[in-house]
Image (spheres, helix red, strand yellow):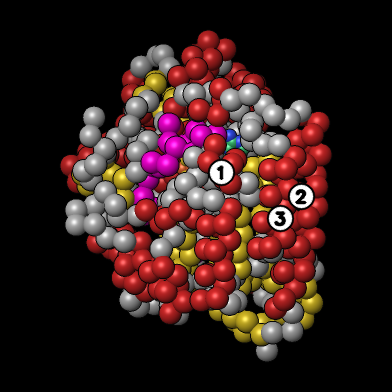
Amino acid sequence: MSFNNQITSEEETLRQKEIMERLKERIANISKELGRPLTYCSICFGCQMNAKDSEKLEGILETIGYVRTDSEDCDFLIMNTCTVRENANLRVYGRLGQLKKYKKKNPHMMIALCGCMMQESLVVEKIKESYRHVDIIFGTHNVFKLAELIETKLDTKGMVIDIWEGTSEIVEDLPSDRKYSFKCGVNIMYGCNNFCSYCIVPYVRGRERSRKPEDIIKEIKELVADGVVEIMLLGQNVNSYGKTLEPKVSFAKLLEMIEEIEGLKRIRFMTSHPKDLSDELIEVMANSKKICKHLHLPVQSGSSKVLKDMNRSYTKEDYLTLVDKIKTAIPDISLTTDIIVGFPTETEEDFMETLDVVKRVRYDSAFTFIYSKRTGTPAANMEFASTDEQIKERFDLLLNEVQNIAKETCARFEGTTQEVLVEGVNEQDASLVTGRLSNNLLVHFPGTSDMIGKFMEVKLKESKGFYYLGETV
Ligand code: 5AD
Ligand code: SF4
């Protein structure tokens, strides 16, 4: 199978839209018979890519006539799964067990599973054997086919399973149900070619494929026309965007094109791999009026030896040099990261190197994970240099250090006035609204729901560690 050519399959889009039209009628008929609307519940685990896929699935379900509910006691339950760490899988099995009772009560109920976990054949085998109340299983490559799979299920008795090994197809222009009216994620690429030795993503999300710049720009322009002011460009490694395109387009160039879009106010992106972060990108970020002052730059480990074993393609020194370069070019940038503790070859000494990086970079926040063995990845065959107890101790130490530093780092903007985008009414105190700063931190301040989606100038009066309290000026 070739993974290098991008096919924007207009025919496939049309075909799926026709199926949706047919289904709309069928769902309306069932609903009439029952004398009530059919409901769907969408559960999503994992990263922003999954969140974006779930918006697409929800868009299809809404189009064919299902009405959203938060209750799992519904007519169509879709669970978008993650498999990046073992505990994500365990949560899915737990949840599935609990769903049996709803299915017994409601013969119309369908349960669908999709996402990264379904790309693993052992998982599908287990579901086929032990969770026979599941109706539809599909993976990461054919999210656009949901309507077709539902149609097949309505016409057949058994479990409908459709897992693709990989794809070079990118199906554009299907419905999507956006969570927020003012901000939205936009896929710019799919898959990953990096094969970090601990990571299952390249196996379940397939090879890297970039969307054409013109398709991305068209989507963003439509979003802006619909009221979106902030976009988050999504990819496993956005810095290698465009390498598979003909002609090649760098991520920095794409950002420059997006910057030109009138009405768009903020541009975010994730995730950046340190090995591909170019000087060109730093320059574009430094000169941009729209790119937010935040960079998520996963370090994973501070030890050059462990980084080599992880197949990360940079050393501790490379990473620190890169961070210096970024901080010099963009002094008020917020840096965040991902760190894995307890990678098989990590010793106490290696861990100290990680702590050293944390102390030197002074991240605004860091996601810390204990290494989780993923069958099929190279690291799964490596011997452990440390015991579980030692790893747990390191994890606690790291978390403590990260949190203490983050508290101090985040407070550095206290007293300044910043532009924030208001995202919603505060859940704990309805007299407050919550806004997001360019650097991704949140500020709570007195306000009303009509401010949602608007930019306001807010004085950051008091830092609370990971957020601020403020007031409009
Ligand atoms: N174990 C623990 N953490 C992992 N991650 C990816 N694979 C694993 C694993 N096997 C973490 C990395 C990555 C983040 C999304 O998840 O830190 O950046
Ligand atoms: Fe996994 Fe590495 Fe690809 Fe990120 S860059 S998705 S950690 S393989």
Q: Which residue is denoted by mark 2 in the rendering?
A: 399
Q: Nearer the viewer, residue 289 or 151?
A: 289
Q: Nearer the viewer, residue 75 or 328?
A: 328
Tag 3: amino acid: Asp
304 left or right, relative to 311:
right
Tag 1: amino acid: Leu
242 left or right, relative to 158:
left
Estimate the spatial distance between the alpha carbons at disc 3 and disc 1, rounded to whole Å: 15 Å
48 left or right, relative to 426:
left
Q: Position of residue 309 (x, y in %)?
A: 54, 36
Q: Position of residue 457 (x, y in %)?
A: 62, 84
Tag 2: amino acid: Leu
Badge 1: residue crowd in 10 Å (few <14, some 14–19, many ≥20): many
Q: Which residue is denoted by mark 3 in the rendering?
A: 356
The span shown in magenta is 183-203
Estimate the spatial distance between the alpha carbons at disc 2 and disc 3, rounded to whole Å: 13 Å
Q: Earlier in the sequence, mark 3 or mark 1?
A: 1
Q: Earlier in the sequence, mark 1 or mark 2?
A: 1
Circle 1 or circle 2, nearest the eye = 1
- Disc 1 on helix, strand or loop? helix
Q: Which residue is denoted by mark 1 in the rendering?
A: 307
